[in-house]
Amino acid sequence: MSEIKSSHTELLKAFGIPYVQARYQLSPDTLTSTTLSLENGKETESGALAINTGVFTGRSPKDRYIVKDNLTEKEVYWGEVNQGFDSGAFDLLYEKMKRALADKTLFVRDGFACADPRYQLSIRVCTEYAWSSLFVNNMFIRPSTQSLKEFKPDWLVLNLPTFKANPKLDGTRQENFTIINFTKKIVLIGGSGYTGEIKKSIFSILNFLLPLQKNTLPMHCSANSDSNGKTTLFFGLSGTGKTTLSADKNRKLIGDDEHGWTSDNKVFNFEGGCYAKVYNLSKENEPEIFEAIKKGALLENVTIDKEGKVDYKDTSITQNTRVSYPIDFIPNVKNPSIGDSVKHVFFLTADAFGVLPPISKLTPSQAAYHFISGYTAKIPGTEEGISEPFPIFSACFGAPFMPLHPVRYAEMLAQKIKKNEVNVWMINTGWTGGPYGVGKRISLAYTRAMIRAVFDGHLGEYSYKDYHIHSVFGVAQPRSCPGVPSQVLSPRQTWNNDKGYYQQAYKLAKAFRENFKQFEVLATPEIRKAAPQFGKANII
């Protein structure tokens, strides 16, 4: 292990951090062996490192703040999602964190965000744990030897999981926190070992900077491209299938989670790796992800036996079990991670009410409406107190990371869809034949067949002959699709209970409309008209 170079020590001082014992840009092997020697993790039979993130096994959105100052006050969409933090309180908390470094060793890692050099952000991440630095290595774009010599960080991320705030003195809600300061270009993360806080803080930064400074739409989506360079985007909240469906052996993976869509119709990955959910993972269903879990990968909060075998079905720690790995662990990736000419956009939702079609085509106004809504559903067992399906709405499919008003992002999306003549589809990866507990999860094989049919041009033109207009949600659902039984394409038919189906459909439609009230003032009349309807059901 090497101590930090003096030049880099000077750069830490530029952020107000005095000299500390630090290890700079350690290799994945060294970070893994360090973690194992400190007994902070275990090696799995595949060679991957498995660790436990502690009390927090997921993000804590109620404890994420943005410093409110002259730069952010008039631009940020303040509220429950974007909570303001006093700049003076930030300075005091930062000083406390720096004093806490006196007896610690920092693992310091430099990397980039944004594969397109025109938008690249230089980031220095200082972590308390070696495995956190491995996560940073996996998830951000890894600099070349030459670029490291010339590296000048735009942003600093200070990540100290064992540092706990005093809410009464420091202005936080509780002991853990993530605070973004756009003026000083510093992110403070304390009290939580969950690595996703690191990556999502950078995502939040780009979601603020790119629309305002670069006329580029930041997106919580995965992306891949075909042999002709045509790009497809997959939007969706956690658990809806972004990573799974974008990892396609017949297409080049651009990225699995965060991207920018430029004014010249290019799409670039923000990251240099993937962060996949591994609950119920199998080699048969998700071979690309399964094979990527090898030496250098970091598994979080999984259970393993004495021989190092992982039980991917075990949720005793959390259902949010994860793995991070460099993007080139996937064999079929685009290098660099930049795509051209967006052709299709998919909105993914895991509808546990079982009423949305497994695939439907959206008009531009419907696309804007569903983008702003960002719907999926939680099912019993995922959170305490949930006994039946519960609708979840996250604006732009990523509300916790979107500092600007959702309508601003939606308008950018609508403009790009119209300008580039992009097809927009909604895919339900949730339930069919009834709601959760009655019906069953839509077959992954069927979902892939529907997406493949879109790519192959088999779903025909938008016409009454080829499509049925859903009587509640107004979306166009195809009447036939290669590789999928016709009955599966009609959610009402899979129920065999019209009354029960429409009761659930209207229940979900009401939830959509109630959620959208907060956006109606800024939404155009065309977008508002795309809302679900409560008229008499027309059964066709």
Image (cartoon, rainbow, N blue to C red):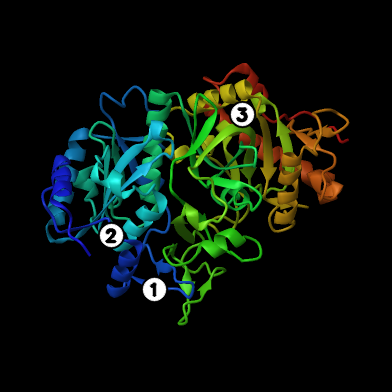
Give the residue displayed 50% in from the left and 24% down from the top.
263
Q: Is residue 478 left or right of residue 362?
A: right
Q: Nearer the viewer, mark 3 or mark 1?
A: 1
SS for callout 1 = strand
Position of residue 184 relative to residue 133, above or below, is above
Decide which of tag 2 and tag 3 comes sooner along the chain.
2
**What is the quadrant of residue 160 in the picture?**
bottom left
User: Do residues under tags 2 and 1 come within 8 Å of each other at their CB atoms?
Assistant: no
Q: Which mark is residue 369?
A: 3
Q: Nearer the viewer, mark 2 or mark 1?
A: 2
Q: The disc labelled 3 sits on which kind of residue?
A: Tyr
Mark 1 = which residue? Answer: 42
Question: Where does residue 297 sit, x and y in percent of width and height?
Answer: 44, 62
Foreground residue among 397 and 387: 397
Q: The disc labelled 1 sits on which kind of residue?
A: Lys
Position of residue 466 relative to residue 22, above or below, is above
